Image (cartoon, rainbow, N blue to C red):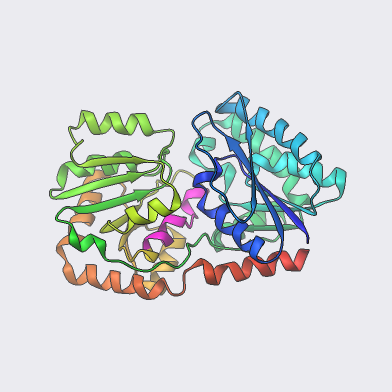
C-alpha cells in the first residue's frame, strides 16, 4: 500500500476540503497522513479513517510562524516513510520540495488558490516578492499538480510552464431539508474565513437597509474583531450573528436553516477574480439561491445551471437591493432554488472524487 502525506498550515478540524480528499484516497487503498498545525485554542482531533498529525508552533501568525512551521515540517517529513508528498499551497511547498528531492519521493502540488495573488499578499510587495521567488524556484520543477478551477489552471499553467488538473472543491451529497421555510426571520448566510476582500464590511452595512432578516457569519479570520466592532457601531447586533468556527457536520445543520447564501469577493487580485469557491457549491448542495460576483468562473457556472444572482457592484446599497429583490420575487427565488436542486446532482464530491483517484493512480 502506497503512503501519501498531505501538508497544510491550518487546523485540520475545520478543513472540509482536505478531509474529503484524504477520506477518498484512503478508500482508494492508499495509506494517508494529513499534517497541519496545532493552535493554542485547537480542540482535540476527531478520529478519521486516515491518520492525522498537528505540529505545534510557538509563533501563531506572521512571518515567524511560516518560518517556524516550515522548519518543523521539514524535519517531520525527513523522518517519515512515504511514497508521495502532496504540498497544499505555497506555504508548505519548500519542505515538501526539499524532502522529495533528497529522498526521491513523488511530489504533488495542490493549489487551493493562486497564493501570490490573494489580497493579504498583494498589499505587501516585499512578502509577495518572497512568495513569487519560492513559486518560481519550485513549481516549474514539479511534474504533478492540480487546482480547484479551470481558469486558475490555465493561468498557473502558463505562468509556471506545468500542467494543472482541475479537481473542484465540491461537497458530498446531502439530503435536502427545507428547514428555512419554518422560520419567520429570513436568514442570509456567509460561511468561510472572515478575511479582507470578502465583501463582509459592505454586507454588514447593507443590513441597515434590510428588515425581517438576519445575517449569519460562520467562521473566523483576520477581520473577526473589526467586523464585530462594526456590527456594534452600527447597532446591528440584533441583525448580525457570529457563529465562529463550526465543525463540518454542525455547519451543514446551520446552512440548512438559511434562505440565501453569499459569496461576495472584491477584485483584489487574480486569486479572487478567477476563484471557484467551495461555498458556492455548498450553497447549491443545500438548495440555497446565492449572490455571487460577476467573475468568470461564476458566470460560466451560472450559464450552465442558473443558480445565482450575479453582482458587479460590491457596495452596501446594491447588495441590499439584490437581497431584497431575491426575497420579494418569489418566482425568481423558486426558479433558482429548483435549479440548485437539479445542479446538486451533478456538482458533488461523489462524482468529483473519481477525477482525484484517476489523478493519483496515474502517477503512483
Q: What percent of the width, then of the height, locates residue 144?
A: 73, 58
Whether residue 147 is visible, yes or no, is: no
The residue at 26%/41% (across/down) is 241
Tell me the quarter of the picture where residue 151 sits: bottom right
Tell me the quarter of the picture where residue 249 sits: bottom left
Q: What percent of the width, then of the height, locates residue 284?
A: 38, 65
**Residue sitting farthest toward the front:** 47
Determine whether, in the image, residue 278 is placed left or right of residue 141. Answer: left
Whether residue 216 is visible, yes or no, is: yes
Q: Which one is in front, 130 or 51?
A: 51
Q: What percent of the width, then of the height, locates residue 331?
A: 19, 72
Image height of 140 relative to 94, above or below: below
Q: Which one is in front, 323 or 158?
A: 323
Question: Is 74 included in the stretch rendered in magenta?
Answer: no
Image height of 195 relative to 51, above or below: above
Q: Which residues are magenta?
A: 271-283
The residue at 41%/64% (across/down) is 299
The residue at 61%/23% (across/down) is 58
Q: Quadrant of the N terminus?
A: bottom right
Q: What percent of the width, then of the height, locates residue 159?
A: 66, 52
How many numbered marks does the figure carry?
A: 0
Magenta highlight: main SS: helix
The residue at 30%/51% (across/down) is 189
Q: Which one is in front, 207 or 131?
A: 207
Determine whether, in the image, residue 48 is placed left or right of residue 212. Answer: right
Amino acid at each position: 500500500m502506497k503512503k501519501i502525506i498531505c501538508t497544510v498550515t491550518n487546523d485540520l478540524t475545520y478543513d472540509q476540503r482536505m478531509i474529503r480528499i484524504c477520506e477518498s484516497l484512503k478508500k482508494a487503498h492508499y495509506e494517508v497522513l494529513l499534517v497541519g498545525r496545532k493552535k493554542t485554542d485547537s480542540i482535540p482531533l476527531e478520529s478519521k479513517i486516515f491518520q492525522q498529525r498537528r505540529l505545534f508552533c510557538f509563533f501563531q501568525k506572521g512571518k515567524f510562524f511560516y518560518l517556524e512551521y516550515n522548519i518543523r515540517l521539514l524535519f517531520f517529513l525527513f523522518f517519515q516513510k512515504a511514497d508521495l508528498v502532496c504540498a497544499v499551497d505555497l506555504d508548505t511547498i519548500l519542505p515538501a520540495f526539499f524532502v522529495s528531492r533528497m529522498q526521491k519521493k513523488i511530489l504533488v502540488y495542490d493549489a487551493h488558490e493562486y497564493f501570490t495573488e490573494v489580497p493579504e499578499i498583494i498589499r505587501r510587495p516585499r512578502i509577495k516578492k518572497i512568495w513569487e521567488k519560492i513559486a518560481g524556484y519550485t513549481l516549474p520543477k514539479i511534474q504533478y499538480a492540480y487546482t480547484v478551477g479551470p481558469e486558475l489552471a490555465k493561468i498557473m499553467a502558463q505562468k509556471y510552464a506545468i500542467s494543472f488538473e482541475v479537481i473542484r472543491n465540491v461537497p458530498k451529497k446531502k439530503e435536502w431539508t427545507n428547514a428555512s421555510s419554518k422560520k419567520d426571520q429570513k436568514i442570509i448566510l456567509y460561511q468561510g474565513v472572515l478575511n479582507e476582500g470578502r465583501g463582509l464590511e459592505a454586507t454588514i452595512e447593507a443590513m441597515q437597509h434590510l428588515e425581517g432578516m438576519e445575517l449569519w457569519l460562520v467562521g473566523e479570520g483576520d477581520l473577526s474583531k473589526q467586523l464585530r466592532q462594526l456590527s456594534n457601531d452600527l447597532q446591528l447586533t440584533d441583525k448580525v450573528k457570529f457563529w465562529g468556527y463550526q465543525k463540518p457536520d454542525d455547519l451543514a445543520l446551520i446552512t440548512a436553516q438559511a434562505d440565501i447564501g453569499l459569496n461576495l469577493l472584491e477584485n483584489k487580485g487574480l486569486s479572487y477574480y478567477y476563484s471557484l469557491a467551495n461555498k458556492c457549491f455548498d450553497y447549491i448542495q443545500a438548495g440555497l439561491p446565492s449572490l455571487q460576483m460577476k467573475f468568470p468562473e461564476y458566470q460560466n457556472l451560472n450559464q450552465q445551471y442558473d443558480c445565482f444572482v450575479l453582482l458587479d457592484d460590491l457596495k452596501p446599497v446594491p447588495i441590499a437591493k439584490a437581497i431584497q429583490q431575491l426575497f420579494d420575487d418569489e418566482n425568481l427565488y423558486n426558479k433558482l432554488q429548483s435549479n440548485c436542486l437539479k445542479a446538486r446532482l451533478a456538482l458533488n464530491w461523489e462524482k468529483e472524487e473519481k477525477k482525484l483517484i484517476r489523478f493519483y493512480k496515474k502517477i503512483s
